[in-house]
């Protein structure tokens, strides 16, 4: 984690123009509130999520239907509750925007968000058969980073098994590869900006699009 903070300190001038990332403050009260989310209530609420995020929160891969490309939809199963809660509240507060999710999130109370987060966190993380062997470059970025570009290892924050960490650091193992890649590209281009301290914007700007895709494939096939 110290290496991450060093990275942010050295790259911070690049983010001086960044907008406020989120209105969520991780106070002890907020963390406790999310911790007490009711997964049983969340399960009931999640029935309306199944058409997009899958029966078991596994998400959907990108597909072409009737000549139209439908974007990948993220897996939510096994995601850390704090991360899911933060994203729902960021949509509610307009810190993050999506044509579908913004309207849905604005119809959810804080308690609804906590309950949904608790339910999805209780589900087993999706397991996908790796579509291709993990590249050596992706494995190195995950375990070692790249000192020449001041890139910390992905595992520093996201864990050695992509399991995520408390607060706003998501689990990555089993995530839909197309969604993962699109997310990093959105950070890289500045189209998404609800990452605290601009962490993912700064890091993704140092990655090539090929590296982003290789990391996406690596994490999709990773088992928690």
Image (cartoon, helix red, strand yellow):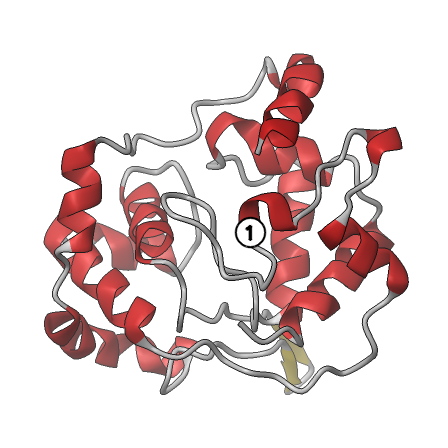
Q: How many marks?
A: 1
Q: Residue at x 76, y 54 (%)?
A: 212
Looking at the picture, how far across and down is residue 18, in whole percent? 55, 21
The quadrant holding residue 213 is bottom right
Decide if residue 29 is on the left or right side of residue 100. left
Q: Residue at x 49, y 22 (%)?
A: 19
Frontmost residue, 107 versus 20: 20
Looking at the picture, how far across and down is residue 49, in whole percent? 31, 75
Q: Is residue 100 above or below residue 40?
A: above
Q: Is residue 44 above or below residue 197?
A: below
Looking at the picture, how far across and down is residue 147, in whole percent? 83, 33
Q: Secondary structure at mark 1?
A: helix
Q: Quadrant of the N terminus?
A: top right
Decide if residue 148 is on the left or right side of residue 125. right
Q: Residue at x 40, y 70 (%)?
A: 78
* Circle 1 residue: 158
Q: Is residue 213 above or below residue 45?
A: above
What is the crowding at mark 1: few (fewer than 14 residues within 10 Å), some, or many (at least 20)? some
Residue 108 visible from this viewpoint: no
Q: Is residue 14 above or below residue 147?
A: above
Looking at the picture, how far across and down is residue 207, in whole percent? 80, 43
Q: Residue at x 80, y 62 (%)?
A: 214
Residue 211 visible from this viewpoint: yes
């Amino acid at each position: 984690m110290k290496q991450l903070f060093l990275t942010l300190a050295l790259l911070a001038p690049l983010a001086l123009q960044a907008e406020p990332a989120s209105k969520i403050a991780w106070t002890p009260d907020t963390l406790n509130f999310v911790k007490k989310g009711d997964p049983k209530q969340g399960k009931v609420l999640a029935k309306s999520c199944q058409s997009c995020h899958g029966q078991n929160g596994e998400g959907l891969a990108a597909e072409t239907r009737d000549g139209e490309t439908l974007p990948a939809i993220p897996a939510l199963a096994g995601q850390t509750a704090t991360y899911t809660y933060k994203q729902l509240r960021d949509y509610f507060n307009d810190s993050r925007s999506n044509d579908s999710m913004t309207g849905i999130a604005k119809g959810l109370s804080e308690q609804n968000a906590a309950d949904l987060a608790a339910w999805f966190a209780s589900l087993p993380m999706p397991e996908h058969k790796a579509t291709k062997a993990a590249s050596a470059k992706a494995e190195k970025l995950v375990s070692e980073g790249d000192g020449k570009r001041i890139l910390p290892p992905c595992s520093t924050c996201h864990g050695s098994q992509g399991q995520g960490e408390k607060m706003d650091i998501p689990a990555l193992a089993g995530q839909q590869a197309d969604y993962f890649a699109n997310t990093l590209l959105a950070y890289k281009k500045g189209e998404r900006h609800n990452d605290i301290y601009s962490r993912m914007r700064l890091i993704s700007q140092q990655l090539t699009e090929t590296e982003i895709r290789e990391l996406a494939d690596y994490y999709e096939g990773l088992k928690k």
